[in-house]
């Protein structure tokens, strides 16, 4: 490649990621408000489906398992991810190590959210072979074996994306890593509630994402030091 | 009185005005001739001037930008200051004085050295002389003593001078070294600065390139013709190699320079420049432009002339995608250029598979098999009324059918059907008698229909056939299917035929491409029952039986079959050896437009492109009252017509010089031949090969693991002898797949060609592998036994090993490792274990490396991988070489 090409390419390489990163700017937030609420499930909640643990039963079948991909508790949706999609400035992104446990042949938590750039520590206390197979499209996909002797495995998720994880050894194992662009994210808890804190006053688009039910969003206005209440309604499919 | 001969009056006349006019005229004429020569008749000069202006402007802007960055760069500024300081101290101050005195010393030392050196040289030549005298005396048998003395004397002198010379040299070097050290302090800074400013200063070179300096003035360079001579590129009429001259880059100055992608032509960069013009592709200095794009390479005086878009120039410019036509001049394998020349690849596939070669002869395409079904026993297969309607217009029944529409009247269709029926009747009836429907068949039985539906949808039929409106697997073109859609199959044929056909296709038609899925009787019955629910029996034509038996019809049918050349695509008893009815197309691409018959069409532009496009779009468009045209209507999509046109454009029989040719060796030929076989059997319907195909995968989006395997790189993966046997008699490798690898009944030749094809694609040079068990270290086997065990990699958690089956549902299983010894290439196993995702993106097989256990084989990943390979190659010891089709028939145990 001659020098022109090199210049052109390197210019392209330099400008692209910079633009991507410029999307969110972290800093100190004074007098931030918060957004809290619940994600309601519209329609009749499906009965929890029992998973068939057909392999490595002595380890995996210690606890009975139900399909975690759609859990509704008291009319609220569990394991939905709430994010602010259009926030450009706000609190600092803190990259802490987060942990995903495969104890008893299921992913705990089922949905793990964190800001992009975070390293996920994946634990295998089961003493049998697992493999962590990512179905990512934005980040480069991986499929790592985690045999008995490898108690922890670290993977860094560089770019924002909701990534499905599967274990090919244990067909029922399935979970999600959700890497977000900003530090404003929450996974609805076991009663379907969430809270986003330290949000600078302003008007934002808040989005809820669920692995089975997709995305929906609404506008929310946050006032300084006040709590904005939001309720999402997500229809079952 | 006037003097004789002198006319005083005349003398007094002034011719000044005449001279003035003459001079003025001369000046004007000189000016005009200069203008005409340089401007009027050399428009390319103005073009080049425009380009220099553009190039300079762009470089200047880039320079300014880089310069601005440097000015803002603290490191650069600091270094510049340092350099200025260093230079100042060199030109004045103590250091400067020292340098000046050193330089003086250096020149004195040099003079001294040269003096001594000269003296030594003189002595040497005197020595030469003395030796000559000495030798002369020896030959004349005179006394040599005085000569020897002289030599001794000279040697002494030289010995005395030698150390002096060395001393003088050392002194000079020392001084030089000292000067260098002083100067270097500045030089090093200069180099550092140069590195920082490299991005900026390269633009200076660009600006210098287009300018000419004359003292304080600078001008744009004087334009000149940029010419490439392609020696021995063409051949003349006497078949002698001749050069081709190509001056396109006189105007297309930035064709091979990045940075001009957004300019308008002629100053635009070539699209995908690095792919097309790269050093290992077609550097313009070697291939010129006309090699691919045609046009009139020598012409420079107008775009129209240069592009060859003038009267009687036979090869007008091939713009954009049309230039793909030229690939065939030098490349034998063009389908590998799926991304670079997609139209050509598609055009060739279409040409080979839609039946063009049934009627048209083209060199290189002579031996393609007939693409349509054999009609030897047609009477046993189809409904007679259906047959007549099909012949009349096949697209009415199946718009995406390959068979073209001959636009026949119903009588003619009846006559053709009658002739074909009469030929087939005897053999067809005999076959039907010998192949009755089995007793257990209950037409319309709901249980059988449901079972059949499930089988048809899962066993692999959909790798080739569509079963509903708009459903298809391998597209032949935008609007054509390679394999028939079966949505109305019951209106075409009977349960009896269908049953025996799917049970054993070659039992009905020995040369068919339709494979056997090794169906059991029950499976075949169920599937037949389901297929017979697709479509309804057609309404019978009145008196069809009599019409087909009518001797007059039969006789007329034969004439019609011969006229339309039906045997080009179908096997017809008695007409197997008839020759093609269409024109030979070997040199069609180089036909000048004058040789193309436009009939009475004045609305079509008289170019090769327009003629060909319209011919393919409406094949009989040029027919006139007197001149009939036979080519039938294929109903191709516009994109496909353009693809075919690109291929046809390349039918030129151009003999391009050897040095321009791409590799056309045996291996390339094997890939081309093997790919044809691969396409003939439609392997890409189920498997992705060469990053194309695997069309069945669209039905497995939910769980891609259940789709047939991807075969990119297959040649590298499996051992050739195993692969050959597998192709001849497939065995289930992945018991969790519901789709079955069919038995194609390949001849040894075809199976071999397929193996060579995959080997050629993967560039496998040694297709066989030998495992010497004696050479496998015991240490490896022991280590690997630990590695594969439950506490480590737990391989058999998913992999089958002979009769030892994994736990859990069969969908979670992985291939039988006992097969590895015969099946897998040991080198591939290493690659696979190093990084399975790299070999096969998306595979279920996880990466175990890097990161093997520390306590085995010294924790060395490489050694562990080798140990695993040795283990895998050893565990299948003694297994039978090939498993017969009978074993494959048994369905895997399902949960």
Image: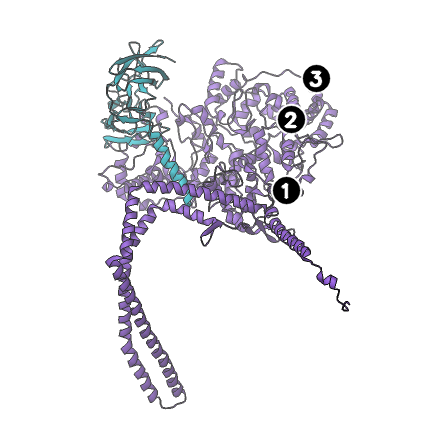
Residue B358 to residue B24: above or below: above
The x and y percentages for residue B692 are 47, 33
Q: Are marks 2 and 3 on the same chain?
A: yes
The label nearer to you, 3 versus 1, is: 1
Q: Quadrant of the C terminus of chain A?
A: top left
CB atoms at circles 2 and 3 under 8 Å apart?
no
Q: Which mark is residue B543?
A: 3
Which residue corresponds to mark 1? B590
**Horizontal side, residue B514 vs residue A73: left or right:** right
- N-terminal of the pair, mark 3 or mark 1, is 3
10 Å crowding of disc 3: few (<14), some (14-19), many (20+):
few
- N-terminal of the pair, mark 2 or mark 1, is 2
Real-space Cα separation, disc 2 to disc 1, in angstroms: 29 Å
Chain under callout 1: B
Circle 3 SS class: loop
The x and y percentages for residue B539 are 64, 15
Which residue corresponds to mark 2? B405
Query: Is residue A51 among the parts visible in the rendering?
Result: no
Say which chain is cyan.
A
Query: Is residue B471 among the parts visible in the rendering?
Result: yes
Which residue sits at x=77%, y=69%?
A: B4
Chain under callout 2: B
Colour assignment, chain B: purple
Circle 1 SS class: helix
Real-space Cα separation, disc 2 to disc 3, in angstroms: 24 Å
**Horizontal side, residue B468 vs residue A74: left or right:** right
Q: Nearer the viewer, residue A205 or B858?
A: A205
Q: Which mark is residue B306?
A: none
* Picture quadrant where residue B800 is located: top left
The x and y percentages for residue B839 are 38, 36
């Amino acid at each position: 490649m001659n020098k022109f090409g090199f210049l052109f390419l390197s210019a392209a390489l330099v400008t692209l990621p910079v633009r991507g990163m410029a999307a969110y700017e972290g800093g100190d937030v004074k007098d931030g408000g918060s957004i809290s609420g619940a994600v309601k499930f519209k329609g009749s909640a499906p009965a929890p489906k029992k998973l068939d643990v057909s392999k490595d039963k002595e380890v995996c079948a210690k606890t009975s398992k139900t399909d975690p991909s759609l859990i509704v508790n008291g009319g609220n949706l569990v394991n939905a991810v709430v994010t602010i999609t259009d926030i450009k400035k706000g609190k600092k992104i803190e990259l802490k190590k987060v942990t995903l446990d495969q104890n008893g042949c299921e992913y705990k938590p089922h949905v793990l959210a964190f800001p992009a750039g975070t390293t996920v520590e994946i634990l295998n206390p089961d003493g049998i072979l697992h493999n962590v197979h990512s179905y990512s499209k934005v980040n480069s996909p991986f499929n790592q074996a985690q045999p008995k002797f490898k108690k922890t495995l670290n993977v860094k998720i560089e770019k924002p994306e909701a990534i499905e994880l599967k274990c090919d050894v244990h067909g029922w194992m399935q979970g999600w890593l959700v890497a977000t662009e900003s530090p404003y994210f929450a996974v609805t808890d076991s009663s379907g509630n969430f809270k986003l804190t330290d949000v600078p006053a302003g008007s934002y688009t808040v989005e809820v994402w669920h692995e089975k039910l997709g995305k929906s969003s609404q506008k929310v206005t946050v006032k300084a030091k006040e709590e904005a209440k939001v309720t999402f309604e997500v229809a079952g499919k | 009185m006037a003097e004789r001969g002198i006319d005083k009056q005349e003398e007094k006349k002034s011719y000044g005005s005449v001279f003035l006019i003459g001079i003025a005229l001369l000046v004007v004429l000189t000016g005009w001739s200069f203008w005409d020569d340089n401007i009027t008749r050399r428009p390319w000069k103005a073009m080049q001037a425009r380009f220099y202006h553009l190039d300079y402007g762009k470089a200047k802007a880039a320079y300014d930008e880089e310069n601005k960055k440097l000015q803002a760069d603290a490191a650069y500024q600091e270094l510049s200051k340092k350099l200025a300081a260093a230079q100042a101290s060199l030109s004045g101050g103590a250091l400067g004085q020292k340098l000046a005195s050193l330089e003086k010393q250096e020149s004195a030392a040099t003079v001294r050295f040269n003096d001594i050196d000269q003296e030594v040289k003189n002595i040497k030549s005197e020595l030469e002389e003395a030796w000559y005298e000495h030798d002369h005396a020896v030959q004349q048998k005179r006394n040599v003593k005085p000569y020897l003395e002289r030599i001794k004397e000279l040697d002494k002198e030289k010995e005395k001078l030698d150390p002096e010379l060395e001393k003088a040299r050392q002194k000079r070097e020392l001084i030089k070294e000292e000067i260098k050290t002083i100067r270097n302090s500045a030089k090093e800074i200069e180099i550092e600065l140069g590195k920082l400013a490299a991005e900026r200063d390269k633009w200076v070179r660009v600006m210098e390139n287009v300018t000419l300096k004359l003292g304080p003035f600078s001008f744009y360079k004087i334009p000149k013709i940029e010419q490439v001579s392609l020696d021995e590129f063409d051949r003349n009429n006497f078949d002698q190699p001749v050069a081709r001259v190509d001056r396109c880059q006189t105007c297309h100055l930035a064709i091979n320079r990045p940075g001009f992608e957004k300019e308008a032509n002629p100053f635009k960069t070539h699209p995908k420049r690095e792919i097309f013009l790269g050093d290992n592709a077609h550097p313009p200095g070697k291939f010129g432009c006309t090699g691919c794009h045609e046009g009139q390479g020598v012409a420079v005086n107008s775009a129209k002339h240069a592009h060859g878009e003038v009267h009687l120039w036979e090869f007008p410019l091939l713009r954009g995608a049309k230039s793909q036509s030229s690939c065939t001049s030098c490349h034998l394998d063009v389908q590998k250029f799926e991304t670079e020349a997609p139209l050509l690849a598609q055009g060739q596939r279409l040409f080979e598979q839609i039946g063009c070669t049934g009627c048209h002869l083209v060199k290189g395409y002579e031996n393609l098999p007939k693409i349509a079904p054999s009609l030897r026993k047609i009477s046993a297969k189809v409904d007679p009324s259906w047959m007549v309607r099909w012949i009349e217009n096949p697209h009415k029944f199946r718009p995406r059918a390959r068979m073209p529409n001959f636009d026949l009247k119903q009588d003619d269709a009846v006559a053709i059907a009658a002739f074909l029926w009469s030929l087939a009747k005897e053999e067809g009836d005999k076959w039907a008698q010998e192949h009755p429907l089995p007793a257990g068949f209950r037409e319309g039985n709901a249980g059988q229909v449901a079972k059949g539906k499930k089988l048809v949808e899962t066993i692999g039929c959909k790798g080739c056939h569509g079963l509903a409106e708009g459903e298809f697997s391998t597209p032949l073109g935008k609007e054509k299917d390679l394999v028939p859609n079966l949505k109305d199959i019951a209106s075409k044929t009977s349960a009896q035929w269908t049953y025996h056909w799917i049970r054993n296709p070659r039992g009905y038609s020995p040369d068919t491409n339709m494979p056997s899925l090794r169906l059991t009787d029950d499976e075949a019955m169920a599937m037949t029952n389901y297929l017979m629910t697709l479509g309804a029996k057609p309404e019978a034509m009145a008196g069809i039986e009599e019409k087909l038996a009518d001797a007059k019809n039969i006789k007329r049918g034969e004439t019609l079959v011969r006229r339309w050349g039906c045997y080009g695509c179908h096997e017809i008893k008695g007409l197997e050896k008839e020759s093609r009815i269409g024109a030979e197309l070997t040199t069609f691409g180089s036909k000048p437009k004058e040789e193309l018959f436009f009939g009475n069409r004045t609305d079509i532009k008289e170019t090769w492109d327009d003629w060909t496009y319209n011919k393919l779009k409406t094949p009989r468009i040029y027919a006139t009252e007197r001149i009939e045209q036979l080519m039938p209507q294929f109903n191709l999509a516009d994109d496909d017509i353009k693809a075919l046109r690109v291929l046809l454009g390349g039918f030129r029989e151009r003999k391009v010089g050897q040095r321009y040719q791409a590799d056309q060796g045996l291996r390339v030929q094997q890939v081309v031949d093997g790919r044809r076989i691969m396409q003939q059997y439609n392997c890409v319907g189920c498997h992705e090969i060469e990053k194309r195909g695997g069309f069945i995968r669209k039905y497995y989006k939910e769980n891609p693991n259940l789709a047939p395997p991807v075969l990119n790189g297959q040649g590298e993966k499996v051992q050739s002898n195993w692969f050959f046997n597998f192709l001849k008699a497939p065995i289930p490798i992945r018991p969790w797949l519901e789709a079955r690898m069919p038995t194609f009944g390949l001849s040894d030749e075809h199976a071999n060609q397929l193996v060579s094809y995959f080997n050629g694609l993967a560039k496998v040079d040694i297709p066989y592998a030998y495992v010497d068990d004696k050479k496998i270290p015991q240490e490896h086997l022991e280590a690997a036994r630990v590695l594969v065990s439950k506490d480590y990699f737990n391989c058999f958690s998913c992999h089958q090993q002979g009769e030892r089956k994994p736990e859990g549902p069969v969908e979670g299983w992985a291939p039988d490792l006992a097969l590895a010894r015969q099946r897998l290439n040991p080198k591939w196993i290493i690659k696979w274990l190093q990084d399975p995702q790299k070999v096969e993106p998306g595979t279920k097989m996880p990466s175990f490396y890097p990161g093997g256990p520390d306590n085995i084989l010294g924790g060395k990943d490489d050694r562990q991988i080798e140990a695993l390979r040795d283990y895998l190659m050893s565990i299948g010891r003694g297994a039978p070489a090939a498993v017969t089709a009978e074993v494959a028939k048994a369905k895997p145990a399902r949960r």
